[in-house]
Amino acid sequence: MGKYRKEDIFRIVEEEDVEFIRLQFADMFGMIKNVAITSGQLAKALDNRCMFDGSAIEGFVRVEESDMYLYPDLDTFEIYPWRPQQGKVARLICDVYCPDGSPFEGDPRYVLKRVLKVAEDMGYYFNVGPECEFFLFHTDEEGRPTTNTHETAGYFDVGPIDLAENVRRDIVLNLEGMGFEIESSHHEIAPAQHEVDFQYEKGLKAADNILTFKMAVKTIAKRHGLHATFMPKPKAGVNGSGMHINMSLEDAKGRNLFEDPSDQLGLSKLAYQFMAGILAHIKSMTILTNPLVNSYKRLIPGYDAPVYIAWSLAANRGQLLRIPSTRGSSTRIELRSPDSAMNPYLALAACLAAGLDGIKKQMEPPKAIRQNVFTMSEEELKKEGICHLPETLGEAIEEFEKDDFLKAVLGRHVYTKYLEAKKEEWNEFRYQVTDWELGEYLYKF
Ligand code: GLU
Ligand code: MG
């Protein structure tokens, strides 16, 4: 049973004076799209009769098959606290359907739902807790974003050095107004960089939350005259922004299936197999967890982001997979490569599917690496069998094309369109002559 029935939505809309309802969905690249309706159209929307032109959305359909229907997920009804409080604005996240009543293969939310169903059929429920990092920069006289800041604060600093405590406060309060349970927020390592962590949720809600979170942060920052960016590496020479993903499985009774007090590290066999599955598929999944040309500028040594494919216990932050030290119901694994440019539906679908593949095939992870991987020589890395993550979007594309596993997870439509788009992006970048090249070569050669 869901949280809301149709009657509840009608009642809340009436009682709360909601005037507009945004029917929201995500395109293939995790961009939020919406069509706004007035409350007079709510009955039509809740009967799944609202339509839009799918050909206008990137990665969706061709012009000749363009009618798509929005089926609102009633449990996602929320009022935007930052919009006017009279004639309020609410949103409903929707699934996208074809005119014949079948779910649309290109809807990323459907891709995640499919994998969650596979997990449920095996008796597993996926929990996800993201750690979202972002920068707050100034805008120029015309309101365009810059990478300027006059902040100098660092990790965990407080005001008055931290100039954005009021922005973070406003972000947290607004998100709480939308039902988020915020666990903590703090200044991150780089000047003007911040992190807000919210309570873990079941896979689908966690993905919905990630998109809502980004929208809220950008909106609130704008109110403070700042630009919030989730770009993975907006500035060379300082840390980039990641979105580490904490994952665990539980059973139908809500018991954490990753903990086993009798194991040396307190982890269950299932946790090891899940981790092994992720390690086995990480290279081909990286295009989903790190989707931009710019994502690969973050995955370099020296900035607390992972480069090598290895796992370890809590202490080692440069590692791809880390086991945070809490046990019991909070036992989990933390994947540190993803960044916030990912489409959360597709990236979480890939993570869960890879983990389940590890379970199905009873994979075993390589041994934990206790050393700092960044101080190991090429030879030592080779001896330990440690490979590196793709270093460019181009490499990630090659890995993606090599692994049939993801083709099945994403389905043919998403796989093909996603690949096409990423190839285009990579080629466009390759065709550029950058400022760095001009600075380095123009005079010398
Ligand atoms: N900003 C770092 C990254 O790119 C992570 C810093 C941290 O450990 O929180 O992943
Ligand atoms: Mg962090």
Image (cartoon, rainbow, N blue to C red):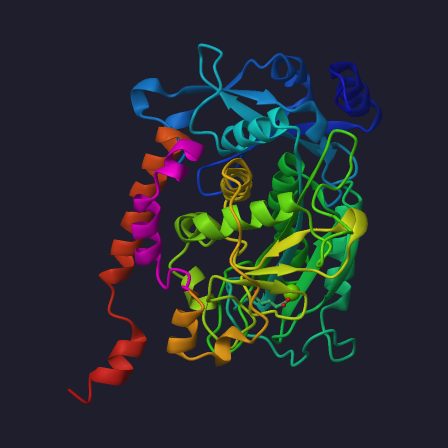
- Residue 49 forms part of the magenta stretch: no
Q: Residue at x 33, y 36 (%)?
A: 417
Provide the residue span drawn in magenta.
387-410
Q: Residue 279: x, y in percent? A: 49, 53
Q: Residue 141: x, y in percent? A: 52, 68
Nearer to us in this view, 155 or 141: 155
| Residue 342 visible | no
Q: Is residue 361 above or below residue 389?
A: above
Residue 326 horizontal side relative to residue 295, left or right: right
Q: Image quarter for residue 334?
A: bottom right
Q: Residue 402: x, y in percent? A: 30, 45
Q: Residue at x 80, y 50 (%)?
A: 328
Q: Residue 176: x, y in percent? A: 79, 46
| Residue 191 visible | yes
Q: Residue at x 64, y 46 (%)?
A: 269
**Labels in figure, total:** 0
- Residue 402 forms part of the magenta stretch: yes
